[in-house]
Image (spheres, grey):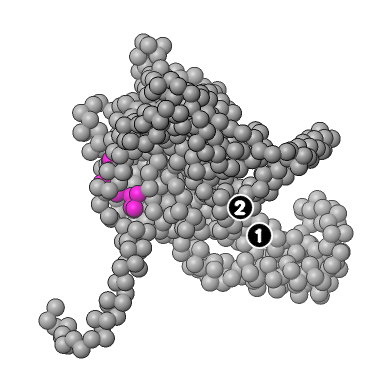
């Protein structure tokens, strides 16, 4: 009821606004705030007037007449031009050269990058809620302008943000990168204690030479972090190490426990898991089961729904392993096949290697095949039901008949058991880690003691692996799996500890514990990609991620009241903050050095990508292809391959 009233009130507001516009007579005159000459203090006269249309959310759409005043005495500026005055208050509403206000820009930016709405949706919202007509192209321009303003605002408030983090006793620097199917890498610096994105950059490839300047820029703006949390990528490890060595500070470089576990899981399980997936696909189990289910559904028609109560009654007789006759029997067989396909119910909705859905599917097919043996011992009396049951048997028979399934799943299950035991030892449960409530339950002292306990448990697990490892004999695969785990612990074990930070007295003293994972940043990457898929409708985001500005990661900071309080006071005042930035820039008050430094650093980056967007555009504009075709079609002398 409340929602209906809100909708009706919005419609009434838009209607009244239209009436006001329709009954408005003439234009609104907008003149300078002061009418005297700044040099001779004499009166000024109107030099010219010009019409202008502006659209705002706060005041609606307005036709203006802009007045420009000129000194009556003819005073001149240093460059020889006449002294004039223009209305400066106008530029608090709209930027120079634009008809759409800052509040529309903020509205478009938040809807685009926070709610991931399509341009047509934003266009419709502005029309229906605020009676503002705007093209989709202008919406794209406003969205880009929003990111530019937000990034400038973030950089201009670096000192204030730095002071806020210093009051916490410093900040841990979480770094990670993401990409999509060969697109350029989006590298992000984040602080987990505040939940703020400190910076983001577009890298051609994830390499140490490009990562290190980003870390230097963060330290230049926000000071030296209390620790660095990173994953185990081949580029980020040497980049972080070289960066800390150059700082000559005692900074712990911590490895994300989640990435540590994930890397071990992939090395342990990926080869066997891929073999199982290929084998399952070669037999087409899913397609065959789906075909049986669809055909039975068409035969049964509405009886499939009516038979659900009979199926419930049948499931209560667990000791009587016999399938009844008629429609009920066919419905039961249909449900058996559906149970095999519902293997995702055994997962935790996590990605590989934490979940192994193809192994779960195989296990369900194997269990179902053994159950069918029990049903065939006392076969259905209905020949039609018996025929369908035998057909289902033939579909899933290969899980028993093909010995490759046995060998692959035996290897995979033993390795998965080791992996799950390691996961239990590290007490890493991604679902629980994502719960904010879980983080508030334990005190900092409890977290510190838990870390000590986990470290001791890992040492005991390591010793048990050494004892379990067969030195010779048939346990070759087990020996190899244990070696994989021990090798990871040996190489990365030192980076798994050091999360307890002693706070300075000005921050209250005591200790504070850094989170063991980079999940806060990983969740932001996941939200970004889910939102972009929602907006674009595309599953593969290669093109979208290449064209997405790195500044889009800063939009998530607007969800944190402490960040908003520092940069602009409140979200309602964000348009005012953007206007202030532009006015400072036009008056040469805003310092441009940070932007210049950033541009210089980007221009100095080594091109490590095989075919970046810039290179692709260059070779097409430079007509390299035509040059190659011309050379290939010329009468060049033959060169024997032996001469190379």
Give residue 414's position: percent from left, percent from top: 45, 52
Q: Nearer the viewer, residue 621 or 19?
A: 19
Kindly report which numbered mark, 1 or 2, lies closer to the viewer in this rendering: 2
Residue 494 found in image quarter = top left
Query: Which secondary structure lies at badge 2?
Result: loop
* Disc 1 from disc 2: Cα separation: 51 Å
- Indicate which disc residue 340 carries: 1
Q: Nearer the viewer, residue 62 or 367?
A: 62
Q: Quadrant of the C terminus?
A: bottom left
Query: Which secondary structure lies at badge 1?
Result: helix
**Mark 1 or 2, nearer chain start:** 2
Residue 1 found in image quarter = top right
At x 32%, y 74%, the residue is 625
Give residue 10's position: percent from left, percent from top: 77, 37
Q: Nearer the viewer, residue 43 or 96?
A: 43
Q: Is residue 207 rendered magenta in the image?
A: yes
Tell me the residue that label 2 is attached to.
135
Give residue 582's position: percent from left, percent from top: 45, 34
Q: Is residue 104 rendered magenta in the image?
A: no
Q: Nearer the viewer, residue 110 or 115?
A: 110
Residue 11 found in image quarter = top right
**Residue 557 shows in this picture:** no
Q: Is residue 110 depicted above or below 275 in this figure?
A: above
Give residue 121's position: percent from left, percent from top: 65, 49
Q: Which residues are magenta?
A: 203-213
Q: Residues within 10 Å of mark 2 (few under 14, many from 20)?
A: few
């Amino acid at each position: 009821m409340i929602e209906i009233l809100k909708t009706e009130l919005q419609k009434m507001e838009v209607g009244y606004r239209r009436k006001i516009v329709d009954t408005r007579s003439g234009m609104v005159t907008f003149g300078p705030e002061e009418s005297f000459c700044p040099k001779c203090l004499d009166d000024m006269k109107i030099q010219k007037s010009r019409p202008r249309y502006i659209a705002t959310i706060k005041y609606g759409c307005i036709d203006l007449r802009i007045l420009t005043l000129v000194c009556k005495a003819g005073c001149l500026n240093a460059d020889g031009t006449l002294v004039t005055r223009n209305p400066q208050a106008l530029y608090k509403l709209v930027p120079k050269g634009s008809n759409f206000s800052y509040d529309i820009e903020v509205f478009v930016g938040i809807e685009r990058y926070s709610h991931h709405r399509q341009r047509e949706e934003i266009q419709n919202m502005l029309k229906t809620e605020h009676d503002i007509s705007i093209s989709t192209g202008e919406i794209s321009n406003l969205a880009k302008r929003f990111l530019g303003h937000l990034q400038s605002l973030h950089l201009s408030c670096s000192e204030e943000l730095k002071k806020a983090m210093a009051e916490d006793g410093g900040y841990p620097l979480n770094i990670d990168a993401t990409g999509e199917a060969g697109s350029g890498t989006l590298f992000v610096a984040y602080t987990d204690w505040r939940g703020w994105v400190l910076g983001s950059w577009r890298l051609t490839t994830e390499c140490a030479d490009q990562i290190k300047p980003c870390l230097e820029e963060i330290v230049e703006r926000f000071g030296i972090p209390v620790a660095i949390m990173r994953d185990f990528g081949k580029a980020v490890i040497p980049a972080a190490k070289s960066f800390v060595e150059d700082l000559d500070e005692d900074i712990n470089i911590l490895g994300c426990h989640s990435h540590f576990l994930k890397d071990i899981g992939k090395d342990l399980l990926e080869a066997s898991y891929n073999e199982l997936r290929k084998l399952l696909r070669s037999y087409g189990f899913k397609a065959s089961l789906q075909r049986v289910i669809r055909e039975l559904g068409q035969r049964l028609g509405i009886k499939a729904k009516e038979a659900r109560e009979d199926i419930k009654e049948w499931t209560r007789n667990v000791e009587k392993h016999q399938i009844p006759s008629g429609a009920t029997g066919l419905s039961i067989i249909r449900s058996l096949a559906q149970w095999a396909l519902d293997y995702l119910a055994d997962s935790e909705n996590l990605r590989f290697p934490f979940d192994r859905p193809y192994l779960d599917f195989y296990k369900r097919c194997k269990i179902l095949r053994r159950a069918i043996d029990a049903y065939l011992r006392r076969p259905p009396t209905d020949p039609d039901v018996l025929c369908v049951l035998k057909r289902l048997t033939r579909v899933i028979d290969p899980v028993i008949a093909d010995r490759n399934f046995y060998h692959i799943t035996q290897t995979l299950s033993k390795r998965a058991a080791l992996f799950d035991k390691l996961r239990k030892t590290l007490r890493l449960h991604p679902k629980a880690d994502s719960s904010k409530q879980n983080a508030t339950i334990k005190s900092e002292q409890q977290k510190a003691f838990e870390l000590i306990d986990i470290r001791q448990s890992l040492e005991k697990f390591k010793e048990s692996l050494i004892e379990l490892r067969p030195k010779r004999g048939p346990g070759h695969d087990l020996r190899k799996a244990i070696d994989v785990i021990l090798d990871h612990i040996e190489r990365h074990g030192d980076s798994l500890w050091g999360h307890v930070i002693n706070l300075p007295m000005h921050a209250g003293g005591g200790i504070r514990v850094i989170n063991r994972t980079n999940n806060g940043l990983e969740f932001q990457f996941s939200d970004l990609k889910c939102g972009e898929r929602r907006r674009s409708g595309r599953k593969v985001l290669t093109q979208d991620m290449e064209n997405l500005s790195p500044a889009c990661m800063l939009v998530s900071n607007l969800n944190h009241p402490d960040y908003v309080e520092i940069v602009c006071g409140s979200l309602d005042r964000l348009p005012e903050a953007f206007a202030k930035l532009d006015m400072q820039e036009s008056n040469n008050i805003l310092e441009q050095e940070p932007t210049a430094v950033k541009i210089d650093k980007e221009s100095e980056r080594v091109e490590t990508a095989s075919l970046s967007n810039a290179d692709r555009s260059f070779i097409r504009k430079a007509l390299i292809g035509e040059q190659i075709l011309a050379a290939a079609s010329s009468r060049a002398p033959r060169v024997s391959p032996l001469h190379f």
